[in-house]
Image (cartoon, rainbow, N blue to C red):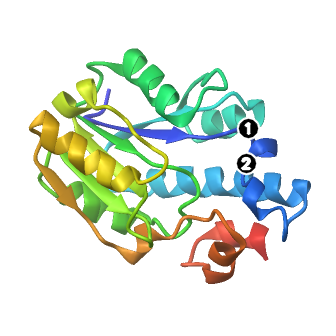
């Protein structure tokens, strides 16, 4: 088992990115979600450090993509993100010394940007979204991961920083444009200019 475990939550493709309904059909949204997972797995595979990947999903197509990329999978049982991460914690306790929580909808989050985040020496390292209110990427040391109260949702950035302070875990913040753009709304989609990643083909 590698020292680093990347945890990749992934909704069923047909249920993802519902807020893009004004500009993308259901089939287009599903294809976009599939390409996002494929791109995320490719970028993790391009990282110079050794890591294992765990995809949290109940989508059989996502499971097949993960297996093809050499990643492990865990059935998320249709739970919400915070509950899914607690499920992953129970299944992976003690398997790594550091954990990276990486959503699939960050098409600009390349291996170099992820490496910069992981180079930060802190028990919790967080990369906020463009608005500075949400959590896009988070890395946790073993001790923090064991007890961290995941609080994804409204104002998760502040909630996660507060949780780190309360738990006594030293926190680091990485403000990186490559990690800040998550694709949730039509405006986000319009702001996306490719970042050199293959995911964009499905959004063209």
Q: Residue at x 27, y 60 (%)?
A: 117
Q: Quadrant of residue 64?
A: top right
Tell me the crowding category of disc 2: few under 14, some 14 to 19, or many 20 or more residues within 10 angstroms, Cα based.
Answer: some
Q: Which mark is residue 12?
A: 1
Query: Label 1 vs label 2: CA separation?
Result: 6 Å
Q: Quadrant of residue 88?
A: top left
Nearer to us in this view, 172 or 150:
150
Q: Position of residue 108 (x, y in %)?
A: 51, 70
Q: Which mark is residue 24?
A: none
Residue 16 visible in the shown view: yes
Which residue in the structure is indicated by mark 2? 16
Q: Residue at x 68, y 81 (%)?
A: 190
Callout 2: helix, strand or loop?
Answer: loop
Q: Quadrant of residue 145?
A: top left
Q: Position of residue 126 (x, y in %)?
A: 29, 55
Tell me the crowding category of disc 1: few under 14, some 14 to 19, or many 20 or more residues within 10 angstroms, Cα based.
Answer: some
Residue 49 visible in the shown view: no
Is the residue under label 2 in contact with that under label 1 (CB below 8 Å)?
yes
Residue 22, relative to residue 142: is it above or below? below
Nearer to us in this view, 65 or 34:
34
- 41 relative position to 162: left or right: right
- 161 relative position to 27: left or right: left
- 114 relative position to 170: left or right: right
């Amino acid at each position: 088992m590698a020292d680093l475990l990347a945890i990749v939550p992934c909704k069923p493709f047909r249920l993802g990115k519902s807020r893009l309904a004004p500009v993308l059909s259901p089939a287009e949204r599903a294809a976009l979600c599939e390409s996002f997972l494929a791109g995320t797995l490719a970028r993790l595979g391009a990282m110079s450090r050794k890591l294992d990947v765990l995809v949290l999903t109940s989508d059989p197509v996502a499971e097949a993509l993960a297996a093809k990329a050499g990643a492990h999978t865990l059935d998320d049982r249709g739970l919400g993100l915070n509950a899914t991460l607690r499920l992953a914690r129970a299944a992976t306790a003690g398997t790594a010394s550091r954990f990276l929580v990486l959503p699939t909808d960050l098409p600009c989050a390349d291996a170099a940007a992820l490496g910069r985040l992981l180079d930060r020496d802190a028990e919790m390292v967080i990369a906020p979204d463009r608005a500075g209110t949400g959590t896009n990427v988070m890395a946790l040391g073993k001790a923090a991961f064991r007890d961290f109260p995941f609080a994804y949702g409204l104002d998760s950035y502040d909630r996660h920083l507060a949780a780190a302070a309360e738990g006594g875990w030293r926190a680091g913040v990485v403000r990186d444009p490559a990690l800040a753009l998550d694709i949730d709304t039509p405006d986000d989609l319009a702001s996306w200019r490719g970042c050199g990643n293959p995911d964009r083909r499905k959004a063209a």
